[in-house]
Amino acid sequence: MIARRQTRQVTLTGASGSVKVGGDAPISVQSMTITKTADVEGTLAQIYALAAAGADIVRCTCNEPEAAEGLAAIVPRSPVPIVADIHFQYKLALAALDAGVACLRLNPGNIRKPAQIKLVAEEAKARGVPIRIGVNAGSLDPEMYTKYGSATPEALVESAQRELAYFEEVDFHDVKISVKASNVPLMIEAYRALAEVTDHPLHLGVTEAGPPPAGLVKATAGIATLLAEGIGDTIRYSLTADPVEEARAGRQLLEAMGLRTRKTVDLIACPSCGRAEVDVIRVAKEAEAALADRKLPIQVAVMGCVVNGPGEARTADLGIAAGNGKGHLFVKGQMIRVVPEADMVAALVEEAERLVAEGAEARIAAADVGAVEEAERDRQVLLAEQGDDPNAVGQRVELIRKELT
Ligand code: SF4
């Protein structure tokens, strides 16, 4: 179990409910739309897709007056609270507040006049709207660059603290903070240092992580390291990809780390080997795509052979193993059905839905009586064809022994 750092709590109030960040609230997943915010229907379609993929909060840019007007139409129809992303123009922050957004993100690196910052904070306070201080190594306050010589962890933290001090001058405390960098060690050090000096909730992210898979690896390295240390109250993957991938990745990370209750399928698959009776990579990808957005909180296994698959994946809620031109479906390691190989993925999806609706005992009780025998027959056929060592382990062991004697 990961012990989370104690933080204050802020509340983002949206049209269809509120999301709490910090304190004992579940760690939330954020993503950002890549549409023009002025395109209300296009942006809303993306927000719905993000929410379906696991985003609890969505940020939209508010970079022009038309974007602020778009937010006024988007906010009341959004399924999740909307954050307005503000750079350079404090007046757009005020306009976004008028549009009814649930939260603002201000970049201290490019809105620097104290009077403007305090005015925005006062207006946010009057409306009960929190603000994220979004420090970014790439757009750090020039004064911090001058003082520290580069975007060091100390420079990022001091920039956040300065902004926080302006907010405190006007008695505004509903604040989340981020200190993002694209350099993973820098980002980790900055958040660790920040966590030492503030109890405000922290929004984690590796900025400009890039396209997957490298972007996913970088973002996960930074975010997961901090989460494992108990640091972080809300997260965002910044990927050069469809933002739905960001939302899915965020959700999957939190579920994998036991920080959120599982809502989606945990797909496991064998790595394939000499015994594989099917293209495991293709079937696993097809199954992953077919199950991705279904709210099925179970573990599903795709296994390459019926000889070892059901046994290796016996702890999965549901699995399918290939063999002798067929797919062998099993629940908690027990055979329940045999389907033609071409129907493997469709049958897996259907069975996953039924398993969640009816429960494992009911599905095992409803098993096809011949399935167990058929699976065993197929297993024996494969063992007869391939022997018990299709990966030539015995030959390799012999070779090793010869080398070492
Ligand atoms: S033995 Fe079967 S289930 Fe195990 S890795 Fe090989 S193909 Fe996959």
Image (tube, rainbow, N blue to C red):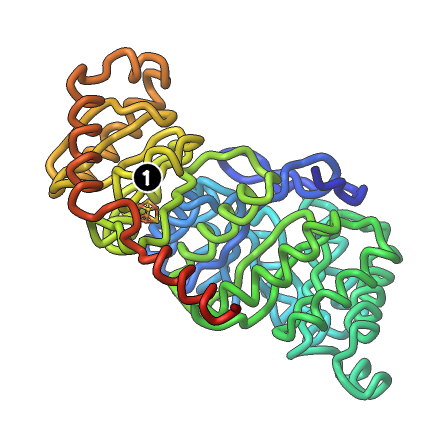
- Please name whichever residue, 108 or 332, is drawn nearer the observer in this view of the structure: 332
- Residue 302 horizontal/vertical position (percent): 31, 42
Note whether ligand 1 is within 8 Å of mark 1: yes
Q: Is residue 264 above or below residue 60?
A: above
SS category of the residue bearing label 1: helix
Side of 56 relative to 365 (left or right): right
The residue that disc 1 covers is 309
Q: Is residue 303 left or right of residue 396?
A: left
Q: Quadrant of residue 185?
A: bottom right
Instruction: Please name the amino acid that badge 1 sits on.
Output: Gly
Q: Quadrant of residue 143?
A: bottom right
At x 19% / y 34%, what residue is drawn?
Answer: 380
Q: Quadrant of residue 179?
A: bottom right
Circle count: 1
Q: Residue 138 placed where, x, y %?
A: 64, 79
Residue 38 seen in the figure: no
Above or below, 322 against 225 in this view is: above
- For residue 87, side relative to residue 326 (left or right): right
Please identify the quadrant where the N terminus is shown. Answer: top right
Q: Residue at left 40%, top 54%?
A: 244
Q: Position of residue 20 (x, y in %)?
A: 65, 38
Residue 220 is situated, as x and y percent measured from the top left of the image, at 57, 59
Does residue 150 sit above or below 262 in this rendering?
A: below
Residue count near mark 1 (Cα–Cα under 10 Å), binned few <14, some 14–19, many ≥20: many
**Foreground of the two, 20 or 382:** 382
* 77 in relation to 394, above or below: above
Q: Which residue is at 61% across, 62% downward?
A: 221
Q: Residue at position x 65%, y 70% from top?
A: 184
